Image: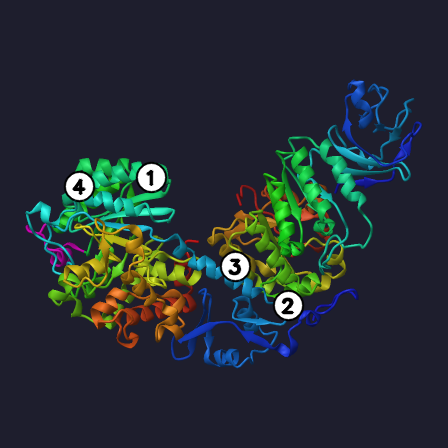
Amino acid sequence: MPVLGKKFRPPEAFDQAINGYYQLLPSRFVRLDGKRYLLSNDVGEFLVVGRGQLADYIQKKVPKGSDFYHDLKSKCFLVDGDSNVALDLLALKYRTKARRISQFTALHIFVVSLRCDYTCRYCQVSRQTDDKHAFDMSEATADKALGLVFKSPSPTIKIEFQGGEPLLNFSLIRYIVANATAENIRHKKNLQFVITTNLSLLTDEMLSFCSSHGIFLSTSLDGPEQLHNANRPRPGMDGHKLTVEGIKKAQTALGRDKIGALMTTTEKSLPAARAIIDAYLENGLDSIFLRPLSPYGFAVKTRQAYKYDVDRWFEFYKEGLDYILEINRQGHRFVELYTELVVNKLLSPFSTGYVDLQSPSGAGISAIVYNYDGDVYASDEARMLAEMGDKAFRLGNVHDDGYEDIMLSDTLLDMLESTLSESIPMCTDCGFLPYCGTDPVYHHATQGDMVGNKALSGFCGKNMKIFRHVVLLLEDDPEARETLLGWVRP
Amino acid sequence: MIRLHSKNNGVLGGLLHRHPFIAKLTDNPGLPKALRPRQALLVSDHEAPITEGFGLVLVAHDNGTPAVDNAVRLAPELRYLKGHDVIKFSPDTLKIDVLYRKEANAHSFLVTERCNSFCIMCSQPPRDTDDRYLVGDMLAALPLLHPDTREIGITGGEPTLWGEDFIRLVQASKNHLPNTGLHILSNGRNFKDVSLAVRLANVGHPDLMVGIPLYADYSQLHDFIVQADDAFDDTIRGILNLKRCRVPVEIRIVIHQQNYRRLPKLAEFITRNLLFVDHVALMGLEVMGFAKSNLKSLWIDPYDFRDELRVAVQTLADAKLRVSIYNTPLCVIPEPVRRYAVRSISDWKNDYLEACGCCSAKRQCGGFFSSNLGTASGHIKPFPAGFVP
């Protein structure tokens, strides 16, 4: 009890909440382990609480003046008669989280060629053919697609060149970069380019073009030589050598921050988490994205996607993340990109632009795909599905449809409506909702329904496991927490 | 400690002033005659020539009496005054108030002693008095300030209580000192009315900052500390309104026994709710005014909240907020966050302990409020020679 002069009133005189009465603000909870729950609100603030605390909170029995009461209040889980500014703050934070939706599509994927020099078993889309014209994007198609790109209100426009192997149609990349840059003089957007490539066809001339236009490269590195070549066979089996050489060349010519790599997990990768990460370290890469295989393309045809289940993949992810945290503890900053996304979702007031982890889904409104033939798809997965013969997510064609036709198409609107997590069975009650999202293409492909039954969903299973794991790391492992906090980008 | 007020001045010649006289000091007796009536000539030694026509002649020595009108023998404690300084002379009491010292590291104008809060640690306890003359004093002084002045401050009391006059002060600061920053200390509560924030923003001051205290992450504690119901809600809404109008805002957190425990939670609250503020200052207690009379309930050795301070600063800095630690000696700030310490105490009330004499970091260290020397941390420890903090 403070000893203050007579002119001052004691703390309890300033509590205008009558009898400790409070009102609950919207919140959800989900079990973390045998004892603890995650309590979260619509803007992603959270508390890890015991079962008794959770019950007290809901039954409005949290003792006034307790730390728990003040924590709940400080994080906008309750309002009492003393203060209602939490409502203003929640509104502000909700707008902040949702801001990206108003900015609309930032990522524009151009599939400049379906042709590829690789014959990956899990590949989702590529074609081996000498017929250039059948599977390359034409200048006329690129012109129409660029017209759509600059209709997006997003202040940032990222054009990503995909394939197949996009370097097989490098003249079109030059053409698009030149025209987009010229067009952008008028639009003054923050314009970036990325080429997703296996690097095997990368020439010095291409590098100098990338250098002068600030173009980023994204490649695939599945791990050490044997694993990489097994996953990503190239006639001659020199894929790993060419990739590693390409990474080195790009790092030298463009800068280390201009080249990143992604990996895909196959059954062969599962026992090799550490070796895969070491391969990234050895090649001077600062991050890795531990990705499960998606159930599209040749992955389905060759039944690669079904060879392991979510539990086994999660063990792989966990082992990988443990090793990455160990690397960070040893004083080297190295980031697992999916975990980084999740940590940012948990700890930052901003949203991330990751298509699969937002509500509604970012398909079409965060990212959009212009296929080589001019067809427009809501996501990269959507066009993979289309290559398997299912064009359920085709939004139109650049030659036949205008911006409004595409963005207001029933296909896209239905999809957005079906991906509002807040109204999806099971998601609506889940404490992880503010961090999660939904992938309509995945659920359509695996369950024949965009919404899907979440109890049977690999997407849900995977993300629940990751969220639980990351929250408990933050909660229980101070060293891991310090590393993970360093991955938050406010 | 430097004295900023004194009545210890003596009349030497015929005093023609009936009303308080605010003037810039000059040591140039040859100033063009037309300019002299509005300036005060500062005479540092008995050999210096004294010319006619100055609004005031301040004799800063004790040898002889000049035969000019409006001559005043300057109190010995004010003889540090120099050309370009600005004073207010009150003829009825012979009091001189120093309004501006060109050499000072901070230039603040107290524009009212009235306040709508009653903070338990207030160093400038509010008085309900008619002090509108303070607005006039500042308006009169502003045109006299040196144009190179880096920053001036408006403080109180609660300056926004003046309403339209408050806006007038900001407008005058912009008009007379377009290249000088303006730092306003306000509890922010009156900005809950968005129209005041709009009016402030519409002045278009090019370098403005409103410093607003936030002492807790929930209402009951903040309201108790400022002794005003609804103050937390008003202040938060005030900050939101100011930032809505793109007025820069600094959050000021004075740390004491009543709030140090939740300092890390307050930092988290700021990163989650107020990430758009422009600066956060974590401040040691100034043992003056109410802080002195309530010391038992307020004092905590900075050494004893070092963990809370470290976590709070790191949380704010990780969120890319600009953070500073004020009023806290370097040797009691945990090493990982020492680089956020700033020499923040105004020079006229800034002192060091005897023990600090041999400290190698004294020049980088903010030291103490003169009023705090008696209640310094028990863990003050001079850094050894060659130590670079």
Q: CA distance from mark 2 to mark 4?
A: 64 Å
Q: Which residue is mark 4?
A: A170
- Residue span colored magenta: A224-238
> Is A231 colored magenta in this rendering?
yes
Q: Which residue is mark 1?
A: A184
Q: CA distance from mark 3 to mark 1?
A: 35 Å
Residue A457 locus on image (x, y percent): 27, 73
Q: Amino acid at mark 1?
A: Asn
Residue B306 locus on image (x, y percent): 57, 58
Q: Nearer the viewer, residue B28 or B3?
A: B28
Q: Earlier in the sequence, mark 1 or mark 4?
A: 4
Instruction: Return the chain for callout 1.
Output: A
Indicate whether B384 appears above or below A489: above
Instruction: Return the chain for callout 3.
Output: B
Q: For the point 48% across and 60% down, which residue is it?
A: A93
Indicate whether A338 appears above or below A464: above
Q: Which residue is mark 2?
A: B220
> In front of the other: label 4 or label 3?
4
Q: Are discs 2 and 4 located on one and the same chain?
A: no
Q: Amino acid at mark 3?
A: Asn
Q: Are discs 4 and 3 located on one and the same chain?
A: no
Q: CA distance from mark 4 to mark 3?
A: 47 Å
Labelled pair 2, 1 in contact (Cβ < 8 Å): no
Residue A125 locus on image (x, y percent): 15, 57
Q: Is residue A235 left or right of residue B316?
A: left
Q: For the point 66% across and 38% down, which residue is it?
A: B105
Rate crowding at label 2 as few (under 14), some (14 to 19) or many (20 or more) other CA atoms within 10 Å: many
Q: Earlier in the sequence, mark 3 or mark 2?
A: 2
Rate crowding at label 4 as few (under 14), some (14 to 19) or many (20 or more) other CA atoms within 10 Å: some
Label 4 secondary element: helix
Q: Which residue is mark 3?
A: B273
Q: Are discs 1 and 4 located on one and the same chain?
A: yes
